[in-house]
Amino acid sequence: MAKRKKLTLSALKKQERVLGFVFASPWLLGLIIFGAFPILASLYLSFTRYQMVGLPTWIGLANYRSLLFNDSIFWTSLWNTFYHVFLSVPLGLFVGICLALLLNSRIRGISIYRTLFYLPNVVSIVAMSFLWLWLFQPHFGLINQVLRPVYDFFNMEPLGWYRDSSLSKMTIILMGLWTAGGSMIIYLAQMQDIPRDYYEASEIDGANSFQQIIKITLPLMTPSIFFNFIMGIIAGFQVFAVAYIMTQGGPGRSTYYYGYYLFDKMINDNNMGQASAMAWILLIITLIITLLALKLNKYVFYLGEQD
Amino acid sequence: MQMSEIKKEDKMPILSLKQKRRIKNGVIHLVLISLSFIFMFPFIWMLFTALKTPAELLAGIGTLLPNDPQWSNFRVAVTTVPFFLYLRNSLIIVFFAVVGTLFSATLSAYAFAKLTWPGRDTLFVIMLATMMIPGQVILIPSYILYNQIGWLGTRLPLTVPYFFGGGAAFYIFLLRQFYKGIPRELGESAIVDGAGHFKIFIYIMLPLTKPALLTVSLLTFMFVWNDYFGPLIYLSNPDHWTLALGLRGFQTQFTGRYDLMMAAAILVMLPTLILFFAAQKYFIEGITFTGIKG
């Protein structure tokens, strides 16, 4: 009897090994067809000249060379993108963390507040761009109207926001903070895992709320901060649609981001070789930053390390 | 006598602690209310703008509220572009994307959570890593591939990949957390009863994780409904345009007419807003309370 049970158990195990692949097969097939194959293909294409007709011709490193050494627009777009990423990611993290800390309180109506702060995230990028085009409109827009007393006080011209090439990138960054509530959810999820007795114990020891945040909440939140940091950088490097709709890359290429240039190379020039090379340069940049961030990973504290 | 004295002394700090907490909560409420106002005002301003006349637009905050609400702006918005055609196109793509995501994400999440098979843990790490790959790397060869098999200009590139776990890494991760939370004994007893994993999956896992399925459906709905880049690249035929893509037509057609642009933008936003409010309990609490550890 016992022997038979053992047999069936091992049979079940064997069955599980097959079933695992069966259950995962849609995703596994997708990983190969829509993941692995395109990645390898774009690596190959980046070493070729290919304009959507005929066959790709191998040209070695020529695409990379011309982008890196003979293309000032490439560098402009890269600079614009770095500017965007290095300001929007820390600002977004800061606002997201502050919101999450506030929304982690146990007060009445907290779920209503959570809903409200998350709300901008359900708005499509087109609707959002329309809205902020109007809000930042230099002459009749709400923001400049509200700021008019300030302008008058300092005796200065109203800011041109997205129409001013020195402010356009900043305008898009500020507008992005409206959706900081998206990362808030991830932080809140992590905060729920922090045991209540940590706070109770520290309260008995006389810690105030600020000390609790610095000494308990923030250290235990580092994994989700890390996650949002990486996701923010990856999303930041791909900024495109906002500029496409709001500024068309202008004024004077000031919001002509890397993703925009890649889009133009691909759709308008049909220059698939150079576009692929740009995609791979982007992949390498994000990889380097992620690896640098992983070095900071030793400061990331994993609660319990269980599971 | 002595006892009561001690009690009295004990009560004092407790009361003040309560009061302290009440003050603290009051301050938090105040901060949250003012912040909510800042976060919500763009929406309110959007609605006000949509109801204004062009003359009122130029007056800015001089006329905060529209004097004579121009509800006809909404009619203009739906009649100057083929709004209902775009709506239909959006719904078609969203429908297949949601069905496809549910199909592929639930099955693979079950495989990752409840089955033991070779390579599982490595593949799980690979799946998480795919979230970190910039979309452009995959975009170009996919575009070429779709061109060669004649899918360019059709809805297929925007629907078929979802049946193969396209963009589903986060959802698989989320569902795996839910499935892991379901006690093993529940499945084991079913196996002893002779039920296979497919039966467990369909009759135990899916019904028990309805909130998670709803969350995944909603997130997919919103992503696909709002997606701008995909339709821009793949839908060359205006008859296939989605609302997000068609909305942009307003910008060129109504330069400076922010009243009409806002009216159209509100109409495009409305379905996601309604869905979000209807399901926000599952949505935010669902993600928040599953936790992200493990």
Image: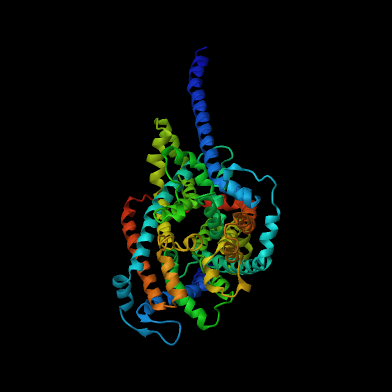
**Extreme bottom residue here?**
A54
Q: Is residue B133 visible in this depiction of the protein?
A: no
| Left or right: residue A46 compared with residue B227 | left
User: Residue B40 at x, y = what percent?
Assistant: 57, 46
Residue A133 visible to an observer of this rendering: yes
Which residue does the image show at 48% across and 67% down from the upper left? B116
**Looking at the picture, how far across and down is residue B102, in whole percent?**
59, 65
Q: Residue at x 68, y 56 (%)?
A: B74
- The image's colour scheme reads rainbow
How many numbered callouts? Answer: 0
Q: What residue is drawn where x is 49% and y is 76%?
A: B143
Give the left or right position of residue A159, taking residue A68 as reference: right
In the figure, residue A122 lies in which quadrant? bottom right
Name the one closer to the observer, A23 or A168: A168
Closer to us: A179 or A190? A179
Q: Nearer the viewer, residue B68 or A58?
A: B68
From the viewer's side, name the closer residue of A127 and B29: A127
Could you say where residue B9 lies in the image, as x and y percent from the top left? 48, 18
A103 shown above or below B102: above
Q: Is residue A229 left or right of residue A25?
A: left
In this view, the residue farthest toward the top is B1
Q: Where B74 falls versus B23 (above or below)?
A: below
Quarter holding the C terminus of chain B is bottom left
